[in-house]
Amino acid sequence: MHQVLKPFMIPNRFFYNEQLSRIPNVFQIRSKTHGSHFTALRILFELHKGQDRKAPPFKPVAQLKAGFVETFGMAEDFDLNSDMLLKYGLVEANNRLDVFDTRVDSIKLTPYGEFVLTDLALAFTYLELVCVDCAISDAEKSNSIAQLSVDEYRMHVERNRLERVQLRIEKTAAFVEYLEHEEAREIELFNMHDRAKITANLRAAFDTERVRILSSAVRNS
């Protein structure tokens, strides 16, 4: 995945920028007034629930948005994330539009959207790349990720592979911890104790992958 993702996400750059990438940042907060890092994934999850993988059904946008607004009160964030999901092909509109507006009656999950939800969003390389592109509300975590990114670039210039991998793991760990804290805060704020945690699978995947990546880096160094 690492060898495939990098050329798509940062073909001519060192750091990821969603506006210049073929792959979106599903953890980005899109509403400037009231948004969440998990809005895009929550929309994908609602479309994924109980679906027939061979023939995923279209679900009414009005129903999806009403449930989302009732729980989170994030109408603008829902619209902005739905627009992003359509533009990047993670969801498909019943009338084939690739922008989200009042003409879109219903949407369904695409195979690409399912892949992002179940695999890509959990991948170390993806998390490590998008974390520098996220608006982060915790100043300490934001500064830490920024400094680790600067240090990582220096290791890249100095061709110090092992220390660079260690910094990438440390940077991603800081991002995962931040997401866990944000989700825990939202669970309390929106009374979602009965829902499965998005970051539970993310944490499990990261803890497994970090061991393999570090072992590989040590071996290759």
Image (cartoon, rainbow, N blue to C red):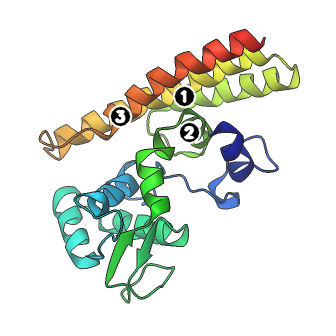
Tell me the number on the disc at residue 156: none
Front residue of this view, candidates 218 and 162: 218
Q: Mark 2, residues whose alpha carbon is within 10 Å: few (<14), some, or many (≥20)?
A: many
From the viewer's perspective, is 60 left or right of 94? left
From the viewer's perspective, is 54 left or right of 23? left
Tell me the number on the disc at residue 201: 3
Q: Amino acid at mark 2?
A: Cys
CA distance for labels 2 and 3: 17 Å
Residue labelled with disc 2 = 131
The residue at the point 70 percent across, 10 percent down is 218
Dot in front, 2 or 3 = 3
Whether the residues at callouts 2 and 1 have beta carbons within 8 Å, the answer is: yes
Q: Secondary structure at mark 3?
A: helix
Q: Earlier in the sequence, mark 2 or mark 3?
A: 2
Is residue 203 at least partly visible in the picture? yes
Q: Position of residue 194 (x, y in %)?
A: 12, 41
Quadrant location of the C terminus in the rendered image: top right
CA distance for labels 1 and 3: 15 Å
The residue at the point 80 percent across, 20 percent down is 155
CA distance for labels 2 and 1: 7 Å
Q: Amino acid at mark 1?
A: Thr
Q: Residue furthest right?
A: 158
Q: Position of residue 44 (x, y in %)?
A: 36, 59
Q: Mark 3, residues whose alpha carbon is within 10 Å: few (<14), some, or many (≥20)?
A: some
The residue at the point 49 percent across, 31 percent down is 175
Is residue 35 at least partly visible in the picture? no
Q: Position of residue 197 (x, y in %)?
A: 26, 38
Residue labelled with disc 1 = 172
181 is higher (above) or lower (below) than 131 = above
From the viewer's perspective, is 117 left or right of 191? right
Q: Amino acid at mark 3?
A: Asn
